[in-house]
Image: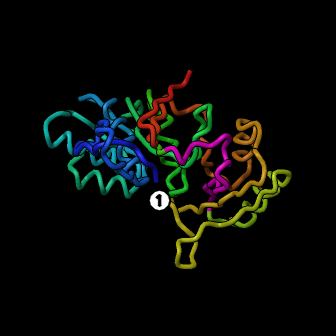
Amino acid sequence: MAVAWSEKASSMEALSLSPPMSPPVILTQDELKKIAAYKAVEFVESGMVLCLGTGSTAKHAVDRIGELLRQGKLNNIIGIPTSKQTQEHAISLGIPLSDLDSHPTVDLAIDGADEVDPHLNLVKGRGGSLLREKMVEGACKKFVCIVDESKLVKHLGGSGLALPVEVVPFCWKFTADKLQNLFKDWGCIARLRNDGKGEAFVTDNGNYIVELYMEKEIGDLQVASDAVLRIAGVVEHGMFLDMATTVIVAGELGITIKNKH
């Protein structure tokens, strides 16, 4: 949670400074996500093909796009969803949808992240949609990442949370052991993600997620990325390197916009 001296605008497009004697407004993490998402939607223009991200932060952006379409402030928008969950949500909002086969070049992506480092490299996929996210966001001319300030880290893995890797179910433990051994010098522990019911979590693509927990900083991210992808059985990993063009951060001091140099 964060504290900002503000009045919550109904549109959530901005925070306006309250009189000096007003009590502070407590902003929840979800409210900060919403502020960042609404700011990102300002990049959207009529006629665009959009990547619709997945997760709690991206959901706010999808909601806002649907609202602007209903109001007639946006038109001729086509969305490409990055998960079945986002697809269903977008359909419920009346957002026209397509796919990369029909639109191989995408104008803009708006999506959240689990971690953002100072170079705008990201960890994504803790929600399990990393493969489709990377495919669609990799086809985008511009990728606006939206986060609250809790997602900022000094280096990827700095939060102590998992680096997700999507793997095929066949002999997944063999693949997990390979991944753990690859990063043994970093104190890596590899675990299969479960669905909360004692079964393996299954992605939209029918695959599993192996979660890597590192004790030390990974180092050269591109070298690590290449090494992971060379392991047979690995489909994709959650390091999104040199992909975000803009990161919008909502925090106690308001909105910060970071652009790739």
Q: Does the stretch in magenta take in 162?
A: yes
Q: Does the stretch in magenta take in 94?
A: no
Front in this rendered view, residue 216 or 128:
216
Residue 69 sits in which quadrant? top left
The reply to whether residue 58 is visible in this rendering is no
The reply to whether residue 65 is visible in this rendering is yes
Determine which residue is flagged by label 1.
Answer: 204
Where does residue 229 sit, x and y in percent of width and height?
Answer: 69, 45
Residue at 78%, 49% in the rendered image: 216
Where does residue 17 sit, x and y in percent of width and height?
Answer: 31, 36
**How many numbered tags mark residues here?**
1
Amino acid type indicated by mark 1: Asp
Q: Give the secondary structure at mark 1.
A: loop
119 vs 147: above or below: above
Q: Is residue 45 left or right of residue 233?
A: left
Q: Magenta stretch: give its range.
A: 149-168
Residue at 75%, 64% in the rendered image: 174
Quadrant position of the C terminus in the picture: top right
Front in this rendered view, residue 246 or 172:
246
Q: Name the dominant secondary structure of the magenta segment.
A: loop
Identify the residue at the far front of this view.
Answer: 21
Q: Label 1 neighbourhood size at 10 Å, few (<14), some (14-19), many (20+)?
A: some
Residue at 60%, 36% in the rendered image: 121
Identify the residue at the far bottom of this view.
Answer: 198
Q: Is residue 117 left or right of residue 19?
A: right
Where does residue 110 sit, x and y in percent of width and height?
Answer: 40, 39
242 vs 31: above or below: above
Q: Is residue 4 left or right of residue 9?
A: right
Identify the residue at the far top of this view.
Answer: 261
Where does residue 104 sit, x and y in percent of width and height?
Answer: 41, 33
